[in-house]
Image (cartoon, rainbow, N blue to C red):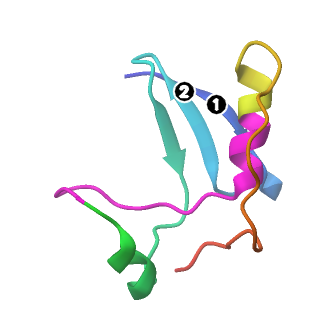
């Protein structure tokens, strides 16, 4: 599998970062989520899977750069952007 760097909103190349693969999937590099309450909210986590917290700004910025056409209006989520918990 080969990956292409899509971008990061972090300074100096620190995570989180998104990549696109030659399989048509997205790879997320970031700090593993370790908060017990947040982990308890996850569903159907398979062996070998983990959760990575990504700022909303990263997703919207990368979508704006790589998706064709005008961005669709998304309903905002209230509350502050979470920071990764280690």
Within the image, what quadrant is residue 79 found in? bottom right
Q: Nearer the viewer, residue 73 or 44?
A: 73
Q: Which residue is mark 2?
A: 20
Q: Mark 1 vs mark 2: which is more N-terminal?
A: 1
Within the image, what quadrant is residue 43 found in? bottom left
Q: Secondary structure at mark 1?
A: strand
| Horizontal and vertical percent position of residue 25 | 44, 27
Count of numbered tags: 2
| Point 73% across, 13% down: residue | 68
- 68 drawn magenta: no
Dominant SS type (magenta): loop
Indicate the quadrant containing the N terminus: top left, top right, bottom left or bottom right: top left
User: In the picture shown, does residue 56 fall above or below 66?
Assistant: below
The magenta segment is 44-62
Q: Which residue is mark 1?
A: 5
User: In the picture shown, does residue 83 fall above or below 76?
Assistant: below
Residue 24 vs residue 73: left or right? left
| Horizontal and vertical percent position of residue 51 | 41, 62
Residue 33 vs residue 56: left or right? left
User: In the picture shown, does residue 66 fall above or below 63?
Assistant: above
Q: Nearer the viewer, residue 46 or 71?
A: 71
| Point 55% across, 63% down: residue | 53
Q: Nearer the viewer, residue 77 or 4?
A: 77
- 46 drawn magenta: yes
């Amino acid at each position: 599998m080969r990956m292409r760097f899509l971008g990061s909103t972090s300074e100096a190349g620190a995570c989180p970062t998104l990549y696109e693969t030659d399989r048509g999937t997205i790879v997320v590099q970031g700090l593993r989520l370790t908060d017990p309450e947040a982990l308890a909210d996850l569903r159907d986590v398979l062996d070998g899977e983990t959760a990575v917290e990504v700022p909303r700004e990263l997703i919207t910025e990368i979508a704006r750069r790589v998706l064709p056409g005008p961005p669709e209006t998304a309903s905002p989520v209230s509350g502050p952007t979470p920071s990764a918990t280690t």
